[in-house]
Amino acid sequence: MPEYKLFAQRVGLVGITTLIVNLRGLILIPILTKTLGADAYGVWSIIRVTI
């Protein structure tokens, strides 16, 4: 039984980590657009796509 519990904890940790990584962009874009403005955000996005 302990093997199943450890497996479930690891699967849960991977799921939570994946969710946080996917939501990072959703949180980061409004912050960047508000602080940088349209011009600087455009440059940032072009550089990010190029990389």
Image (spheres, rainbow, N blue to C red):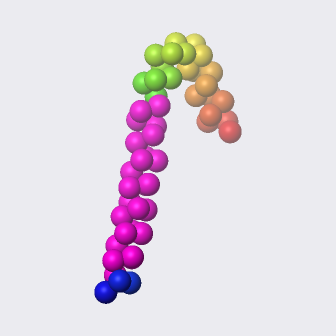
In the displayed structure, 25 sits above or below 22; it is above
Direction bottom: furthest residue: 1
Q: How many marks?
A: 0
Q: Is residue 41 left or right of residue 13?
A: right
Q: Residue at x 47, y 31 (%)?
A: 28
Q: Which residues are the magenta region?
A: 4-28
Q: Nearer the viewer, residue 24 or 43?
A: 24
Vertical relation: 39 (above or below) 47: above
Tell me what residue is drawn at x 57 percent, y 13 percent: 39
Q: Is residue 12 left or right of residue 40?
A: left
Q: Quadrant of the N terminus?
A: bottom left
Report if residue 5 lies within the magenta region.
Answer: yes
Answer left or right for 44 relative to 30: right
State the residue at coordinates (41%, 62%).
13
- In the rendered structure, does residue 43 fall within the stretch colored magenta? no
x, y percent for residue 29: 46, 28
Question: Can the viewer see residue 1?
Answer: yes
Where the C terminus falls, by quadrant?
top right
Task: Answer whether residue 38 is visible to the viewer in this image.
Answer: no
Provide residue 32's location: percent of width, then percent of height. 50, 23
Which residue occupies the foreground of this view, 12 or 42?
12
Residue 24 in the image: x percent, y percent?
Answer: 45, 40
Measured as percent of width and height from the top left, residue 16 is found at: 38, 55
Examine the residues drawn in magenta and state their main secondary structure.
helix
Which residue extends farthest left? 1
Q: In this rendered view, identify the residue nearer to me: 37 or 5.
A: 5
